[in-house]
Amino acid sequence: MLRAMPVRIHFTTEDMARTRFAEAPRPLLELNIALRQLQERSHPTRFGPWRRESLRRLSPRVQQLFDLIPSTGWSVGFLGLPAAKDIGEVLDQIRAMSAGRVRKDMEVWASRDHQRPVPAWTQSLGSDKEMLLELTDVAAHVHQHVIAPYQQRIDALAVADQALRRRQAAHGGLHALLSGLNPRHIKWKPPVLELAMANGADDDIHLSGCGLLLIPSVFGVASPVLGVSAEPQPYLAYPVRHDDTDLALPPTETAQVLSTVPNSMTTLLGHTRAIVLWTIAHRPGCTTTELARHAGISPASASQHATVLRTAGLTTTVRHHNTALHTTTPLGTSLLNTTA
């Protein structure tokens, strides 16, 4: 249920025209959201093993980031930059950030949450460059142990989610997209998008023609994450669909899909199953009916083979209403490439 007084984002026609999807989670923003998850105990089935393994590997210095990125409430602005697509690039941006920008973000952060005391050590962050560099090194350390081991799986889930969103857009336009982002916490009541925030915020936000950048998140499975003052446009992080996800899977290499089914693949999987995997790789987001048609088999056979491939970790499936949408995982594409 939405809170009685949610955050309300008001759209104009121009805002709707400029609203767009990011193709994948943004690394620093996803790290920000993951740090929140590490401090919680929610979703134990999905995140429990990941939390235990991640916390075991982390340095005690991670507490500095916990201070600046609490489990709920506001986090410091420069620790949630959504622009860069490479973690090294965005961390370099923080290292090069001016003292004035750091101080401003710290002042805004401190003024927003009056219920949580500001840690004493943070008062020097805006004037001590060495402290900022050390904090950035901690962020790099956390990313290495919390995100990087699961990056290939995160990428696969983002690809599957994009297939779902494209289908929603094709069938129902922007209305279907916004209505399907996170129905439990995000409600589309044209021309207003209502968000139930974890911190209970109540506000009216006017995009003023900038539109909204919609960013998928694997770790942000509950309340929305909103960046109102982000440049060049505000962003909203929404959860990827995760009908069959498992963050405990080990990382695998990603490779490009081949244009033909190699003989070695048919030897390994069998002729029909190899064709099913090849078809899914070349038609990401295909339904079971579409898979059957392109593979030249019955829908029942396509469903059976897709289940076997999904169980083996070679494909993933998300559901759109009563329709299953199939995409390959990095392991599946890597296998296709290796058998070439």
Image (tube, rainbow, N blue to C red):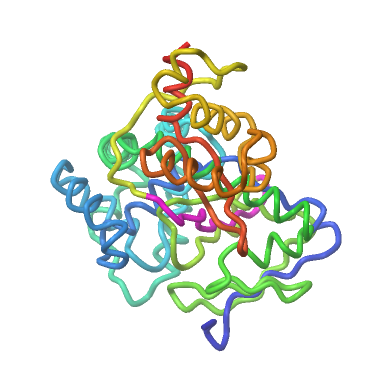
Say if 256 sits above or below 162 in the image.
above
Q: Residue at x 62, y 53 (%)?
A: 214
Q: Which residue is at the front of the view, 280 or 91?
A: 280
- Quadrant in the rendering for residue 116: bottom left
Counting labels gives 0
Among the 4 quarters of the image, the one containing residue 238:
bottom right
* Residue found at x 60% / y 54%: 235
Residue appearing at x 50%, y 42% in the figure = 26
Viewer can see residue 232: yes
Q: Main secondary structure of the magenta part?
A: loop
Furthest residue toward bottom: 4
Q: Is residue 104 left or right of residue 290?
A: left
Q: Position of residue 134 (x, y in %)?
A: 26, 36
Residue 109 vertical position relative to residue 308 in the rendered view, above or below = below
Q: Quadrant of residue 221?
A: bottom left
Is residue 235 one of those drawn in magenta?
A: yes
The answer to whether residue 16 is above or below residue 183 is above
Residue 60: where, in percent of width, then height? 14, 47
Query: What residue lies at 60% left-to-right and 31% top-to-bottom?
Result: 279
Classify residue 212 as left or right of residue 277. right
Asked whether residue 129 is in view, the answer is no
Q: Is residue 122 left or right of residue 58?
A: right
- Based on the picture, tell me whether residue 337 belongs to the magenta stretch: no
- Horizontally, is 303 left or right of 137 in the view? right
Residue 150 coordinates in the image, percent (x, y): 34, 38
Residue 288 position within the rendered picture, expressed as x and y whole percent measured from the top left: 61, 47
Range of residues picked out in magenta: 232-245
